[in-house]
Amino acid sequence: MKYIIMAGGPATRWRKYNNTTKHLIKIGKENLLERLVRQLKECNAKEIFIISDNELYEIPGATRIPLAFDCKLYNMFYYKYLDEPCTFLYGDTYYYDSVIEEMIATKTNDILFFGTQESIVGIKVQNHEKFKYHVEALRKQELKTGVAVNRAGWAIYKKINSLEGDGKIALLDNFVLINESEVANVNDRQEYEQLVEKISNQVRY
């Protein structure tokens, strides 16, 4: 099983806050990428990759893979190397240890999504051919309509499960619900400051 950390986005909401990228922002003594690589290594993950063009994302214990396409979907989901089982993780997400442990331990023969009601935080892909097929289908849809695919994790989840509409998304058997208190997205300054305050309060009390 390969572990793919997606960190190639433009980070438009972050706006170089604190003179760094969101993936390299410090949480305690580690930045988000260092923390995630360490967590995976502590769970005996052997092959860890970070998808990014940023040379500062060379994190010990992981291999950085430059972006290879002009297509966001193909870059995000390791399209060029999607030839065996892998688990996708988000480089701008703070994971509690319990979440990483659950994602690694949970078995599937197909495709399994992990997340809260609001956001997908991981995708475990055993059936990589099926996953690649749906990535390609979304890309064809994008080209046909001229409308970029947003929230790519949810888009693939909906495609696989033949779900329609933009309202509340049904969570089916291939979705593992994560306690929202055990993960945090770090997309902008406010989310980062809220996370730091939360961790500080937990340490204090």
Image: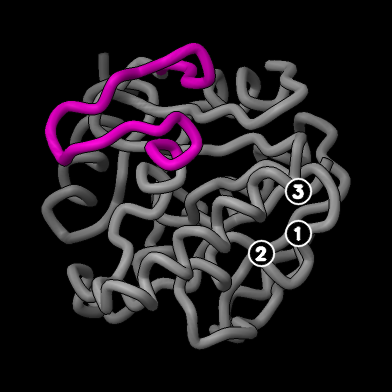
Q: Amino acid at mark 3?
A: Glu
Counting the numbered discs, the total is 3
Q: Camera-side residue: 205 or 166?
A: 166
* On-image quarter of the C terminus: top left
Query: For residue 28: magenta?
Result: no
Q: Position of residue 124 (x, y in %)?
A: 64, 35
Q: Which residues are magenta?
A: 157-177
Q: Position of residue 46 (x, y in %)?
A: 88, 45
Q: Quick check: 178 left or right of 134?
A: left
Query: For residue 159: magenta?
Result: yes
The quarter of the picture where residue 62 lies is: bottom right
Give the residue drawn at x 68%, y 16%.
Answer: 106
Q: Camera-side residue: 189 or 81?
A: 81
* Residues at marks 2 and 3, CA–CA distance in whole angstroms: 13 Å
Secondary element at tag 1? loop
Q: Are marks 1 and 2 in contact (CB under 8 Å)?
A: yes
Query: Along the polypeptide, which appears first: circle 3 or circle 1?
Result: 1
Residue occupied by mark 3: 129
Residue occupied by mark 2: 78
Give the residue drawn at x 79%, y 48%.
Answer: 2
Assess disc 1: are there few (<14), some (14-19) or many (≥20) residues with their C-alpha within 10 Å of its C-alpha.
Answer: some
Residue occupied by mark 1: 82
Residue 56, placed above or below residue 96: below
In this rendering, the label closer to the viewer, 2 or 3: 3
Q: Amino acid at mark 2?
A: Tyr
Secondary element at tag 3? helix
